[in-house]
Image (cartoon, rainbow, N blue to C red):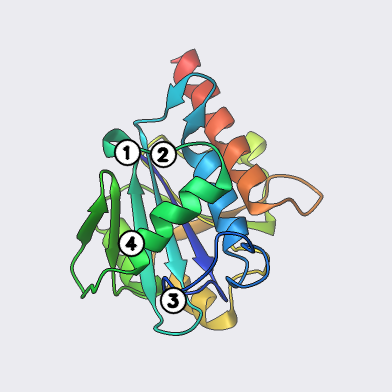
């Protein structure tokens, strides 16, 4: 299972937002919605071997994490608006520290970045932090299919988040000499893992 963790540093944590202004009134939730597309959509189907954790840290009730499980997903369409509606449904639920199912394949919990990294680290697999200053994975070798990939949103991880990550064994990888959008990085990672799997 390939796992992606993306913190939304300003992304809203309440369901009281309009679907007509996803880039303005939601703390750039639109960036995270594009990550959902990149993590799961194939030309004619959904990836069943992927999970995505969106760690929402904006107002009014941070933190909250929405977890997408590829093998269970239903009702997911490739447009941002319908995905935003599923996220809004999840955010309207009264959740606690344990995962609460919102719709098939989508769960929500009152978990922050540290909680999510710790949970994913406990499942095994290498943790890979994607950052421009990291090593070239084509020289050092990309992690296996059961790895956990940590990315920033439109901002890098904060110093506090990097400090949390430093407490777990991980390596830092760069996908190239230029800064890329988060959703594009997920697409590249998926493609690289597909190529590795196809060569085995």
Label 2–label 3 contact, CB within 8 A: no
Residue wearing tag 1 = 73
Determine the CA span between mark 4 and mark 2: 13 Å
Label 1–label 2 contact, CB within 8 A: yes
Determine the CA span between mark 3 and mark 1: 30 Å
Q: In terms of secondary structure, where does tag 2 sit?
A: loop
**Left or right relative to 8: residue 148:** left
Mark 2 packing: few (<14 Cα in 10 Å), some, or many (20+)? many
**Left or right relative to 176: residue 95:** left
Q: In terms of secondary structure, where does tag 4 sit?
A: helix
Give the x, y percent position of residue 4.
45, 50
The vertical placement of 76 against 103, above or below, is above
- For the image, the number of numbered tags is 4
Residue 187 in which image quadrant: top right
Q: Is residue 170 visible?
A: yes
Label 4–label 2 contact, CB within 8 A: no
């Amino acid at each position: 299972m390939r796992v992606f963790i993306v913190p939304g540093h300003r992304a809203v944590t309440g369901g009281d937002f309009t679907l007509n202004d996803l880039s303005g009134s939601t703390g750039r939730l639109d960036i995270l919605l594009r990550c959902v597309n990149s993590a799961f959509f194939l030309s004619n189907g959904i990836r069943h071997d992927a999970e995505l954790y969106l760690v929402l840290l904006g107002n009014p009730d941070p933190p909250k994490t929405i977890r997408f499980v590829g093998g269970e997903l239903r009702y997911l369409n490739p447009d941002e608006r319908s995905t935003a509606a599923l996220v809004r449904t999840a955010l309207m639920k009264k959740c606690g520290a344990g995962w609460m199912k919102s719709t098939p394949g989508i769960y929500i919990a009152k978990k922050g970045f540290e909680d999510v990294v710790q949970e994913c680290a406990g499942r095994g697999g290498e943790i890979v932090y994607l950052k421009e200053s990291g090593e070239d994975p084509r020289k050092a070798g990309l992690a296996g299919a059961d790895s956990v990939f940590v990315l920033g949103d439109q901002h890098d991880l904060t110093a506090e988040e990097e400090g949390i990550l430093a407490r777990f064994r991980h390596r830092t990888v760069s996908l190239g000499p230029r800064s890329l959008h988060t959703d594009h990085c997920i697409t590249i990672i998926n493609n690289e893992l597909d190529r590795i799997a196809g060569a085995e």
